[in-house]
Amino acid sequence: MSPTARTDLLLPADPTQRGIARELYALAKDQPLISPHGHVDPAILADDVPFPDPARLLIVPDHYVTRMLLSQGIPPASLGVPSVDGSAVETDGRTIWRRFAANWHLFRGTPSRLWLERTFAEVFGVRTSLRPETADAVYDEIAARLAEPGFRPRALFERFHIEVLATTESPLDDLGRHAKLAADGWGGPGGRVITTFRPDNVVDMEFDNWAANVARLGEVAGEDTGTYRGYLAALRQRRAAFIAAGATSSDHGHPTALTLRLDEAEAAALYERGLRGAATPADAEAFRAHMLVEFARMSIEDGLVMQLHPGAVRNHNRPLHARHGRDVGGDIPAATEYVHALAPLLDAYGNDPRLRVVLYTLDEYTFTRELAPLAGGYPALYLGAPWWFLDSPEGLRRFREAVTETAGFYNTAGFVDDTRAFCSIPVRHDVARRVDAGFLARLVAEHRLPLDEAAETIVDLAYRLPKRIFKIGEPL
């Protein structure tokens, strides 16, 4: 990529807008990175050992990559994706990399191509274009960098200019990695690496081994989860432990956005049916919906920001799930309704200034029709960045176009990278900053926004908004 192309990547083609966008991007590009939602394994930073070979770092854990290859008949096992059924998988990193490079053309026009190319160039300094015939050369260049001390996880964290990185853990996690980070001066309240409370595996009765998970929750929390009241006490206890480990938010990945306000007896009856293994799918949905309202109540008490990520049909590719487990690219978005689904929660707490709920969607048609009007009408609601299947340059642009006229900029929560791919974090934030620079430049060129206000806004979007909305650096 030429120097000009690197400078103007994703900026508007119109010369007037491009000039303005360059000025705005220059204000945002070096702002510290706030990563308030993601799935990086905290062990990477707690242990700070060198990364494995390039394939195991960049290909094996990236379900964006492996699902695309699967769509063309290349099985995940041949790409080194671990199996849960004991079947054999490829273990040679160079073989995996060659297979990936041989199919590099599949990623033309995709955000995965953009993220990977920028990661190769900006993180590892690779200037050789990836092609089947250059696979070994690119592999060797990255492998050589990974052997250097400056490419260990904590050194890269510093180079990436990350101010705060939030990981995501289950209430069953002992938070040992976060304890080590805190002992090293990296974690705890106000730390550089913080945790996020993700209770899906003890809330969703349709989650694998839900009853066993609930029993384990009781053991970890020291509460009797054989009763509904004991269950709630255990969740409160774990939330307190997560806050002590630096958490500022919780995260809820429910199939739908449904919320319900049940009385204690109704909720306890659902809970007991679940423990007996007698809960129906309707029971499971009702219990999830009720627990979102309970978690909103808990958030008002303890200060955690709620994040709601509904709308994914998990493990849609059942053979893939059976062989490789969860989170390997087998999930599919579904249409999601918010206006009626969220009404019980909003009736109870939507106007309470102590509650902060960040809403995400995989159904972008709801941005204009439902989510922007909701966020523009309730003090408790903010719009999360385009997520997962929508976190592309086009998705980010459509988001700004869809929501700004109704919700403005300041009912949005800034960018979240939502990634397991640690080395792609700076690239993803850079893409978002470039897209926002282009959007704001158009408003300036159309005389809809003064340049000085656009300059303030882009820094808010890149840095100040996510820091404020997710309470980064604030006591809860």
Image (cartoon, grey):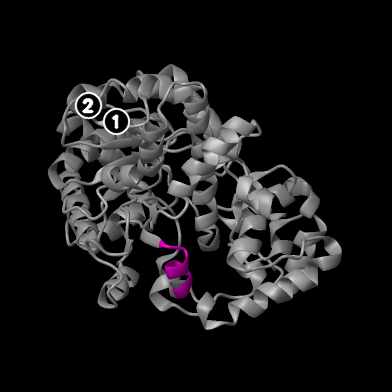
Q: Position of residue 90 (x, y in %)?
A: 72, 69
Q: Is residue 476 left or right of residue 444?
A: left
Which of the two residues, 353 or 68, is positioned nearer the viewer here? 353
Q: Residues within 10 Å of mark 1 (few under 14, many from 20)?
A: many
Q: Is residue 447 left or right of residue 140?
A: left
Residue segment shown in magenta:
155-161
Residue at the location (86% across, 65% down)?
133
Q: Residues within 10 Å of mark 2 (few under 14, many from 20)?
A: many
Q: Main secondary structure of the magenta part?
A: helix
> Which mark sits nearer the N-terminus, 2 or 1?
2
For mark 2, what is the residue? Answer: 350
Asked whether residue 213 is in view, the answer is: yes
Q: Residue 352's image quarter?
A: top left
Classify mark 2: helix, strand or loop. Answer: loop
For mark 1, what is the residue? Answer: 381
> Which quarter of the image is occupied by the N terminus?
bottom right
Q: Position of residue 341 (x, y in %)?
A: 35, 23
Classify mark 1: helix, strand or loop. Answer: strand
Q: Position of residue 60 (x, y in %)?
A: 63, 63
Q: Amino acid at mark 1?
A: Leu
Q: Amino acid at mark 2?
A: Gly
Residue furthest toward the right?
A: 133
Q: Is residue 346 above or below residue 158?
A: above
Which of the two residues, 149 or 218, is positioned nearer the viewer here? 149
Q: Is residue 460 magenta?
A: no
Label 1 near label 2: C-beta < 8 Å? yes
